[in-house]
Amino acid sequence: MYVIRMKNCAFFARHGVRDEEETLGQRFYVDAELTVDPGGALAKDSIEGTVDYGVAFSVIQTIITGKRRYLIESLALEVGKALCDRFPEIVHASITIRKPNAPVPGVLDYVEVTVDWPS
């Protein structure tokens, strides 16, 4: 087993419960920690049978910039499921999404959720 970590993947999207979040949009930051069973891929030094992180980034991007979600928790779950479906070598995905401009009555750096798949 080994772990691929993709940190601070940034996307502009329109997720959130409030109407203004859809209207204005904002940046979202995604971390993906993928535990991978490479089979023989590492010994063979081959991308076949392991995770191409360029493709993984595209999977994340498609979901984050796609259909609006009210909950970033739901968004994180969808990313984890999609990555595991696309790459059967992934035995566990931990997806963290940060929302820096969360509409709260105070000052904070960001709101962050982490969802594990499978849980």
Image: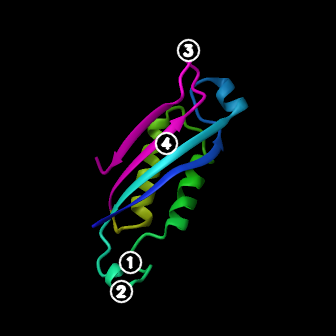
Is 8 part of what is drawn in magenta?
A: no
The label nearer to you, 3 versus 4, is: 3
Whether 52 is drawn above or below 93: the answer is below
Query: Label 3, label 4: how many angstroms apart (C-alpha)?
Result: 24 Å
The label nearer to you, 1 versus 4, is: 1
Magenta region: 91-119
Q: Residue 91's image quarter? A: bottom left
Looking at the image, is mark 3 or mark 4 earlier in the sequence? 4
Q: Amino acid at mark 1?
A: Gly
Q: What residue does disc 4 label?
A: 75
Q: Amino acid at mark 2?
A: Lys
Q: Tell me the quadrant of the picture where the N terminus can be found.
A: bottom left
Task: Mark 1 and mark 2 in contact? Answer it, CB < 8 Å.
Answer: yes
Q: What residue does disc 2 label?
A: 44
Count how many numbered circles sit on residues in the image. 4
Q: What residue does disc 3 label?
A: 106
Looking at the image, is mark 3 or mark 1 earlier in the sequence? 1
Query: Residue at point 72% right, 31% down?
Result: 24
